[in-house]
Image: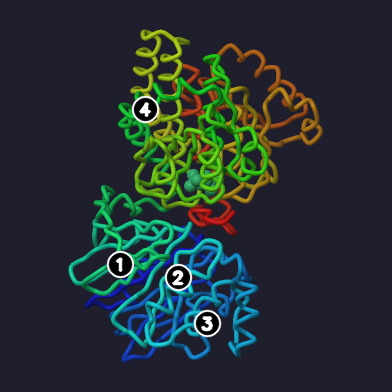
Amino acid sequence: MCGIAGYIGDKSASKILFEMLKRLEYRGYDSAGIACLSDDSVVVFKNKGTVDKVMKESGYEAITSKIGIAHTRWATHGEPSKENAHPHCDSKGEFIVAHNGIIENYRDLKAELMERGHRFESQTDTEVIPHLISELYVDSFEEAFREAVKRLRGSFAVVVLSAKEPDRILIARKDSPLIVGLGDSEKFIASDTPAVLPYTKRVLILDDFDYGIVTKDHVTIKDLQTGEEITKKVHEIEWDIKQAEKEGFTHFMLKEIFEESEAVKNAVKALPDIEKIAKKLKNYKRIYFLGCGTASHAGFVGKYLLERFSIPSELVLGSEFRYSTVNTIDKDCAIIAVSQSGETADTLASVKDARERGAYVVSIVNVVGSTLTRVSDDIIYTYSGPEIAVASTKAYVGQLTSITLLSLYLAKELQRISADYLDEIIDDIHSLPDKIGQILGNEEEVKGLAEKLFDKKIFFYIGRRLNYPTALEGALKIKEIAYVHAEAYPAGELKHGPLALLEEGVPVVAINPNDDLLEKMDSNIQEAKARNASIIVVGENGALKTPVIDPILSPILYIVPLHLLAYHIAVLRKLDPDKPRNLAKSVTVE
Ligand code: M6R
């Protein structure tokens, strides 16, 4: 939610900031802005609209400054508008701030500052920050910044410029990600690694309550409370710049669907960690999968898998966990938190609460070094590479692979399956990348189906057991990128109410693996057919044809045609699947 960027060095700041914002646009795209220091004065340009639109309007190429900050917004406080776009300044225009997060005590701070004569121009929470710095300024930018940040409650990653000390950018973080890319005589500040990848692979990752002074040659990180300097480890980013580019694909989403074979192979690389973690997990009495959105669907598959091996398990949603389930958590519980970004606020807050109650927390995460990895006892990386499209696709396939492996190894530890059975399934997992490749090879057929369906007003997705989450995920994809109303149901539930919505031509996508529930699914399909619904079967003999696979691996395979279907329907509806309206990739607010 919101991307922030900063640059200081010898090159044109505005050009670099524009490129950085483009790579952060997945975090929010309703307005954008840039502020640069030029000849000891500040140039600010901001407006409603995409990064491309706003930067073109700004004539950024003519700005010659070598230091600046920038922002791409996902509105929380105040509608998308020029006034509410970042960066924000104090009344005298001396301190300029870009912020990601929510300042929870902004109303109190604003009232106090207004009493002292500060004039506000936006409805945002952020605007209190530059005013507060200005109010507290005596003769040191750093001291005023630190004192101001200490008074903020809520979540923040902030970058601040001041014409008073034009050789530095000040930064701070709490509960919102912030990194500093290290170049020779230049530094890059960003919410996420893809923004700095073209320039450097060496980064410092800020922790909560860190603040920093960034000049072109040095980065000093200090503790917000004590003011003492902290030594930070320099991380080497392993991602390749190409992974964060479209490489000839029309959209990131399509490219990322085509990386799903690779996502399986990459997730398998964590097998040594998975084996170790399974040995620890077997000691816990209750196991909860935790996540939001797509990640929760991956966790839901995990719950069904563990139950399949007679291991009790629950799925809990990040946004619900801390208001109810947490009361039941103690040291006998293990939490398996699933997240692509590792920055989802609801998931992070739940994990923190669970750990306070003594639970063991394992995270299944894609982004290396993300906040979730820092608050977990153990980590299983999915190694899916950067996922830029807002809709999660390859990361889901990676999560399913990790969860399946973890469930199998835990089942073996608890002697619910034999070593031979485990070997057999592992062989099948190794066959998945080729089988995903076969599905992707049928893209034209999926596109043909999309052409028949793209103007339908409502879709139903049905599945049973392990593939009920597949139905949920298929429906979520078409909702979020194609803006089509979609309902997902366990197939057996149709007759308990939703069947009333079925009429001629309503598409019902039935996820139908070749397992012991095949006949039951067939009956549910007949129920829909009898109401003249259009049935689209995903399975070995379906319109969305899938190769033969052991049913316990079917969620990994069967989601692939559903990703393609949603993508093509969105494109046919003339929508940008990479940037669905109202959404952002990392949801860093609760
Ligand atoms: O980064 P996370 O996996 O924690 O994100 C969780 C959800 O916000 C995310 O999966 C969301 O539902 C996607 N837009 C789904 O495509």
Identify the residue position indicated by label 2 in the image: 71
Residue 275 falls left or right of residue 396:
left
Quadrant of image for the C terminus: bottom right
Residue 223 quadrant = bottom left
- Whichever of callouts 3 and 4 sits on the residue coming sooner in the sequence is 3
Q: Residue 131 carries which label?
A: 3
Label 3 neighbour load within 10 Å: few <14, some 14-19, many 20+: many
Identify the disc placed on residue 153: none
Front position in the image: 139 or 46? 139
Q: Residues under labels 4 and 1: Cα distance?
A: 35 Å
Amino acid on which disc 4 is placed:
Ile
Which numbered mark, 3 or 1, is in the foreground of this view? 3
Q: Where is residue 402 in the image (x, y as percent from the top left)?
A: 41, 30
- Residue 61: percent from left, percent from top: 33, 81
* Residue type of the residue flagged with mark 1: Phe
* Label 3 element class: helix
Name the kind of residue labelled 2 in the image.
His
User: Earlier along the polypeptide chain: callout 3 or callout 1?
Assistant: 3
User: Whole-Å distance between the Cαs marked 3 and 2?
Assistant: 18 Å
Task: Determine the residue positioned at 54% across, 22% down.
Answer: 285
Answer above or below: position of 230 versus 364. below
> Reading the chain from its start, which is encountered first: label 2 or label 4?
2
Where does residue 270 sit, x and y in percent of width and height?
33, 31
Q: Any atom of ligand 1 within 8 Å of the CB at mark 4? A: no
Among the two numbered marks 3 and 2 on one chain, the one whose residue lies closer to the N terminus: 2
Residue 188 image label:
1
Mark 4 and mark 1 in contact? Answer it, CB < 8 Å: no
